[in-house]
């Protein structure tokens, strides 16, 4: 059931006032997902810096999400235990914050939020910042992998052209159409039948970069051709922007949503996966 503000799951977002009122809560951990250089220059008081790349990929295979042991060790270092509420933010269009939110979800930790407007809103509203680093007490994090939130190659290969599944490509227009190849993929284009909606459209255009109201999100998704009754597999190039799409869908109450974590970094670099390049035709939703 939708709430008065339109979001079905408003608890996935943390508003700045809500966060500030709870900044001294020992069961709350604020995680800055930007680079450590930016964290050391300025961050939200009480936040800890993410000491690894915000992609949170496996060190041995960059296509895939960080493994359970490594992720548990990272969360322990950041002071995250099984009963900790995590609030993530970044300075990169919310992509890294939703990435951490999704990896936590993948490992069974559902008490996580993304700061609405992330660093942009916090700074534009003149809220307190500090350069003092927070060193937390070690946490005790137990990974409990949830395979229902992730899509792997074999699953997508069997589902992308099925009547019960729809693929949402959240890359920019040029990547979707095949006109650009900024990441050096062997092939360009999009998965046959994939729907397209650039992830940055989920955020407002003003300096606060907040998540759009639920009514606007639903209109964007409807105009892109998505149907709530069908499962959605979201992807981008490497699985980072992907998580913003997953987050927004979950925020408005869509539950059958998976992230194709390896994304085009895998699909477009194989020889036998179908791709459609539309370099010479108009791009939808542009």
Image: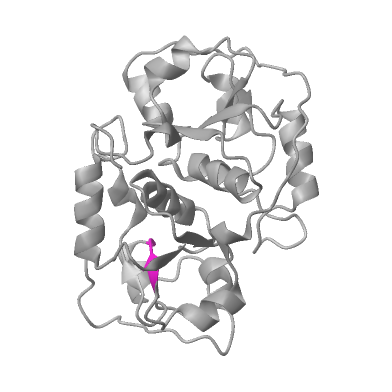
Q: In the orientation shown, which residue stands out farthest toward the front?
A: 1
> Viewer-proximal residue, 4 or 184?
4
Note whether residue 159 is visible: yes
The N terminus lies in which quarter of the figure? top left
Left or right, 104 with reference to 5: right
Q: Main secondary structure of the magenta part?
A: strand
* Figure check: 117 above or below 161: above
* Figure check: 250 above or below 111: below
Q: How many numbered discs, if any?
A: 0
Residue shown at the point (34%, 80%) measured from the top left = 193
Note whether residue 186 is visible: no
The C terminus lies in which quarter of the figure? bottom left
Residue range in magenta is 166-171
* Color theme of the render: one colour
Measured as percent of width and height from the top left, residue 58 is found at: 72, 55
Measured as percent of width and height from the top left, residue 285 is found at: 21, 64
Magenta includes 117? no
Residue shown at the point (31%, 34%) measured from the top left = 210
Measured as percent of width and height from the top left, residue 33 is found at: 56, 35
* Figure check: 273 above or below 172: below
């Amino acid at each position: 059931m939708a709430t008065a503000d339109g979001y079905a799951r408003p608890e996935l977002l943390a508003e700045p006032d809500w966060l500030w009122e709870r900044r001294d809560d020992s069961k709350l951990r604020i995680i800055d997902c930007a680079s450590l250089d930016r964290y050391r220059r300025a961050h939200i008081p009480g936040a800890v810096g993410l000491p690894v790349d915000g992609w949170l990929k496996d060190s041995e295979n960059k296509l895939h999400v960080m493994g359970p042991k490594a992720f548990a060790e990272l969360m322990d270092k950041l002071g995250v235990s099984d009963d900790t509420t995590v609030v993530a933010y970044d300075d990169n269009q919310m992509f890294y914050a939703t990435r951490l939110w999704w990896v936590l979800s993948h490992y069974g930790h559902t008490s996580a939020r993304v700061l609405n407007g992330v660093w942009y809103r916090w700074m534009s509203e003149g809220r307190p910042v500090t350069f003092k680093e927070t060193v937390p007490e070690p946490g005790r994090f137990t990974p409990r992998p949830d395979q229902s939130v992730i899509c792997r190659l074999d699953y997508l290969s069997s589902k992308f052209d099925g009547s019960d599944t729809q693929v949402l490509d959240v890359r920019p227009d040029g990547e979707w159409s095949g006109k650009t190849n900024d990441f050096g993929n062997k092939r360009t284009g999009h998965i046959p039948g994939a729907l397209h909606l650039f992830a940055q459209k989920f955020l407002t255009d003003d300096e606060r970069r907040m998540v759009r109201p639920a009514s606007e999100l639903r209109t964007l998704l409807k105009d892109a051709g998505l149907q709530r009754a069908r499962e959605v597999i979201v992807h981008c190039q490497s699985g980072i922007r992907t998580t913003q799409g997953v987050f927004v869908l979950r925020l408005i109450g869509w539950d059958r949503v998976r992230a194709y974590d390896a994304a085009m970094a895998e699909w477009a670099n194989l020889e036998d996966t179908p791709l459609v390049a539309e370099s010479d035709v108009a791009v939808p939703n542009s």
